[in-house]
Each structure stands twice: as C-alpha cells, then as structure tokens.
Amino acid sequence: MPASRTRRTTAAVARGFAAIAGHDRAISILRAHQRAGRLAHAYCLIGEEAIGKTAVARALAEELLLGDGQPSRLEVHPDFWSDDRPEAISIDELRFHPERGAPTHEQSLQQFLSLKPFVAPLRVALLANAERMTEQAQNCLLKTLEEPPPNTVLLLTTAYPDHLLPTCLSRCQLISFSPVGRPAMADFVKARQPTVAEAEADALVGLAHGRPGWAARALSDRDWVVRMERWAEQLAALAFEDVDGVLTFAGRFGQGPQAEMRLVAADALRGFTAFLRDAMLLQAGVLSPMPSERKSALETWSARVPADHIRASLAAAQRTQLLIDQNVNPRLAMEVMLLDLRVRRPL
C-alpha cells in the first residue's frame, strides 16, 4: 500500500503595510497617495533610530512592486534598489557616471533611476539613514530630486534631518514618525517571539521606548543588548575619569582598520545615546517603566552630573556619530567628545 502523502501548508507571511507595527498615520498618508495615483517622486521618512522608518519604506516598496506576475521578494526584484549599510555612502554609489564604478551596487542610484521599469509600473529606490551621505554626495543627489525621472519613487530615511541639506529636504515629501504605543509594542514583541516570558517582554517594551526596530534587534540578538548596556556603562563612567583615563579608553577605537573601528564606535555611541536619552526622560519625570537595575544606574549617574550635562552629552554623541559617518577618524572623534564631556571637578 503506497505511503500516504501529507500536504504541507505554510502560513502566509505578512508583507507590505500589514507587517508593520503601529505608525498608522504615516501608513494612511502613503496609502492615500498610492490610491489617488499621486505618489511623490521622493519621500523622506523622519524619526529616531530603530523606530521603523526603513521598515515602512520597504513596506511601501512591497505594496508598489510585489504582486501577481512580479518577483516574490524585493531582494530579487529588478525594479528595486536599496542601500541600508552602516558605512558612509560614497558619491560613486549615487552619481550617474561613477569614476570608479559603484563599489557596492551593480548600478549607481542615478543609473538605476534613469532606466525604464523592467517588470513593474515604476522603479523604487531606498536610501536608508541618508545622513550617511557627505555634503558632496547630497549635492549630487540634489539633481535627481530637482529633475526626477518619470515612473520612479525615491525613499530616504533619516534620524537626523538637520544633517541633510535644506535643499534636499525641501524637495521631498516629509513624513514624521512618532514612537509606537506601549500596547502595540507589547503585541509586536509577543508576535515576534510568542515564547518570551511576560516579565522579559515588559522589560523589552520599556527599554525599546516605542521603537519596533530596537525590540526586533534585541529579540534576535541578546548579546547585542548586553553589549549596548556595557558600552553605556563604560562611556557614562568616563564623565568622572581623568584625562589619561579618557585617552586610554578612546585608544581602543583606533586598534584596527578604520572601517571596522567606525562600526565599533557606532555601536558604542548607540548604547551611550540610549542611556543618555533615558537619563533625560528620568530628569523630566516621564521615564517609562523599566528594569530596576537600569533605573538605579540612571538615578545614580544623573545625581552626579550637572543639570545641563545630559542634554549636552546627547547632542555631542549625535554630532560625533555624524562625524564618524562622514569618515572622520573614529578615535579622534571619540577623544574629543569624551574629553569635552568630563565633569569638571572643583579645584
């Protein structure tokens, strides 16, 4: 008797806007533009890091490009171009005739947008974390924003709109993102990992501060969370260190190829920025519930620094990240920031 075959059924994977947690306002704007056939030639999605800007941008691309008769994934779609790397964006990745070719892409951004759509009605390009562009690269992009090719949509995302040229921003449809509410974040965490313990899920939601991207990264890489906490603890302690101690610590950002050290410094700054943000919320009396150890560390550190130190430190950390993105030596950039942020002891 022949063996019976069991038919395997696979759960449908949500894609497009259906896969996004929260951000109803931004999605409703994009849906309205899509349905009316009045999509802007360029959008710039603005919001803090890991809040979901790139996820929404990719969801829009899926809505526009995937469907009957189309490839099943953006990664293999000939009418989709994406740059979501942590490294700085070279001008050769953007301009129409790269001097040395586009090192990371088969075509530069302007070459890609200049071609007619291959299988879809239009071409979509995503440039995530657009603040990685140097001023020279932004000026190169400006021509595309001023004279967009037909049947194209360019999606930019940034957590630092003040790091982009006003002329670039003024030629994009700007959409701002707000943190996702706690109930939606709790649902997001449970949907991503149904087996996570209730206490751990609550802790993650508290630390995420309405950022689904942060929660997703934390769920998939627990070592990353530990690393962020360690960086935050170490950099915060340097506020009370002497000059030699600061310089010795900053030296670790020069112990390898500069490209690698930029990534290490970016990790350190993310951990430090998250700590400073929580300290600022604590100072304002609006800190969300979070693990008691984290809250105790914030209270102890905040009590030892001047009232304006937290805000100045947060601004300096964001400025240092921009400098490192623009290829400033990471060791020197971290040295300057950490020396400036030392709490001066009375003589």
Image: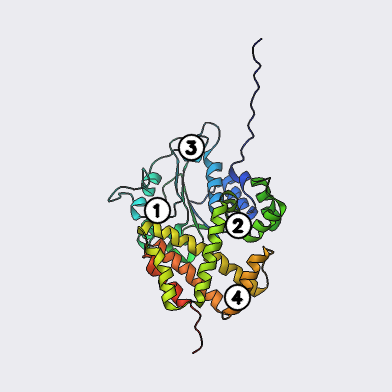
Please say whether residue 170 is visible from this viewpoint: no
* Amino acid at circle 2: Arg
- Identify which residue is drawn at 48% across, 67% down: 318
Residue 190, compared with residue 182, is above or below; it is: above
* Amino acid at circle 4: Ser
* Amino acid at circle 1: Thr
Residue 46, compared with residue 308, is above or below; it is: above
Q: Position of residue 313 (x, y in %)?
A: 51, 73
Relative placement, left or right, of 346 versus 109 is right
Q: Which mark is residue 235?
A: none
Which of discs 1 and 4 lies nearer the camera? The answer is 4
Contact, mark 4 vs mark 2 (Cβ under 8 Å) = no
Residue 10, compared with residue 227, is above or below; it is: above
How are the colours assigned in the image? rainbow
Mark 3 neighbour density, 10 Å: few (under 14) some (14–19) many (20 or more)? many
Q: Which residue is labeled 1 in the image?
A: 144
Q: Which mark is residue 211?
A: 2
Which tag, 4 or 2, sits closer to the chain's start?
Answer: 2
Which tag, 3 or 2, sits closer to the chain's start?
Answer: 3
Which tag, 3 or 1, sits closer to the chain's start?
Answer: 3
Which of discs 1 and 2 lies nearer the camera? The answer is 2
- Identify which residue is drawn at 48% across, 57% down: 172
Mark 2 neighbour density, 10 Å: few (under 14) some (14–19) many (20 or more)? many
Distance (Cα) linking label 3 and label 1: 21 Å
Taking the view exactly as shown, the residue that stands out farthest to the top is 1
| Closest to the observer, 166 or 279 | 279
Q: Which mark is residue 120?
A: 3
Mark 4 neighbour density, 10 Å: few (under 14) some (14–19) many (20 or more)? some
Distance (Cα) linking label 1 and label 2: 31 Å
